[in-house]
Every structure is written in structure tokens, then in C-alpha cells.
Image: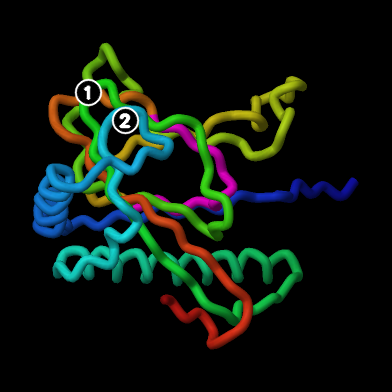
Amino acid sequence: MQKQVALAFPTLLGIFKLPDAQQVNAELKEICLRREKSEPNMQHANVGGWHSKHDFLDAPDACVKTLRGWIIEATNHMIGSTMEHMRSQGMNNPFSGNLGLYGWANVSRKGNYHTLHNHPGSAWSGVYYVDTGGTPSPQYPKSGVIDLHDPRPFTEMTYVPGDPYGQKYPIRPEAGMMLFFPGFLYHYVHPHFGEGERISIAFNVRAERGGAPGTMK
């Protein structure tokens, strides 16, 4: 008997950590809180809190340019990892096209959360955590946690030993952490119950076929 167990329909997630981001985070936090005072909330999936316009990554501030550079570096890594995975499956489809990037800031306080949603049209969606708003108390262990949902419908309908399907993938944010996941992936952010502001920069990366290889605009 020949035995092989292969992975089919994998969902590639990117988790990046910037260990020396304290100064950049402090400057990003100051910008977010300042803009919150003057810019209306752009209501989307957020329940409470503040959602900026989609032009945050276009700001001229040095810390924003640094963050944009980190996102571009991580995007290139995601492209490379995706290509490598596909080649390992016997498929080689080089990417030649344009990449569009835009982002927005989120500020959450006690009781604020994000409803279940996804980001249509985006190759990847992501979030960079500026400040988690404090250590969660034992009373609210999932405070501020982001849950990624299994994208395959009805996988929870049948029991499989080990429960490999239909599960949520929880990630506890850390300051300086950046997540990447496919835009089609539904996700939900649990209510924040920390003492401080939970501040994040969310973004979308869109891919278009044609043009110079891997051009970011």
C-alpha cells in the first residue's frame, strides 16, 4: 500500500513581525488619534470606534512611508511564497501585472468591534497593529482577537476526527504584527475591552494582469 496525504485548496496566511517598531508605532498612533478628532468616521464593518478614509497610506509622514514600505516588502514575500507553493503542485504561472495598495486606520475603544465581513476584489487584505490597547483581562479572553473563518461552505456539517474543517483561525494581535490573508476570507474582530485604544492600519492589495512584473501603484 502506497500512502500519501496531500493538501488541497490551501489558504495561505502571512504573519510578519517588526520587532523594532516602537518609534514608528508611537508616531502612527499620534497621527491616528489626531485625524480621529478632525475626520468623520467612515462607517463600514466597524461597530463603534473610528474608521478613517481610504487614503491613510498616501500621507507624507515618514512613519507612514515606512509602514508602506513594510507592506510592500511583505506583499512581495506573499507573491513569492504563493508562486513557490503553486510550483510545488506542478503549476507555474508567473505574475506579470500591477498591484494597487490602499489602507485606512481604525481606532477602537471599550466595546467596539468589527462585524463578520470580507474584502471583495482584493488579492490580499491585511492589517498592521499599532497598539493593542492593553493586555486583555481574564474576564474577556478574546478581547480584540481576530477570527478568520474557514471559507469552504458547509464544512461544519459533518464530523471528521480531529475537527480539521469548519474551524475559526484566531489570532491575537501584537504591536508590530502584520497579517495577510486572501480578500475573500471572512473575518471578525471580537469586542475590545482593553483600557487603551486599539489602533490598527488595515489595507487591501489588488492585482491586475498585464504590465510590468509586480509593479506597485
Q: Quadrant of the C terminus?
A: bottom left
Q: Which residues are magenta?
A: 178-189
Position of 143 with respect to 83 (left or right) is: left
Q: Secondary structure at mark 2?
A: loop
Residue at left 16%, top 50%?
A: 35
Task: Give the overall secondary structure of the magenta segment.
Answer: strand
The residue mark sitting in front, 2 or 1, is 1
| Residue 168 part of the magenta segment | no
SS state under label 1: loop
Q: Tell me the kind of residue under disc 1.
A: Lys
- The residue that disc 2 covers is 144
Alpha-carbon distance for marks 2 and 1?
10 Å
In percent of the image, x 29 and y 63: which residue is there? 57
Report which residue position mark 1 lands on: 110
On the image, the x and y values in percent for residue 77 come to 45, 68
Badge 1: residue crowd in 10 Å (few <14, some 14–19, many ≥20): some
Residue visible at 38% across and 62% down in the picture = 102
When the figure is inspected, residue 120 is found, relative to residue 207, above or below; the finding is: above
Q: Is residue 21 above or below residue 40?
A: below
Q: Nearer the viewer, residue 201 or 174?
A: 201
Residue kind at label 2, given as amino acid type: Gly
Magenta stretch contains residue 183 = yes
Q: Is residue 176 left or right of residue 187?
A: left
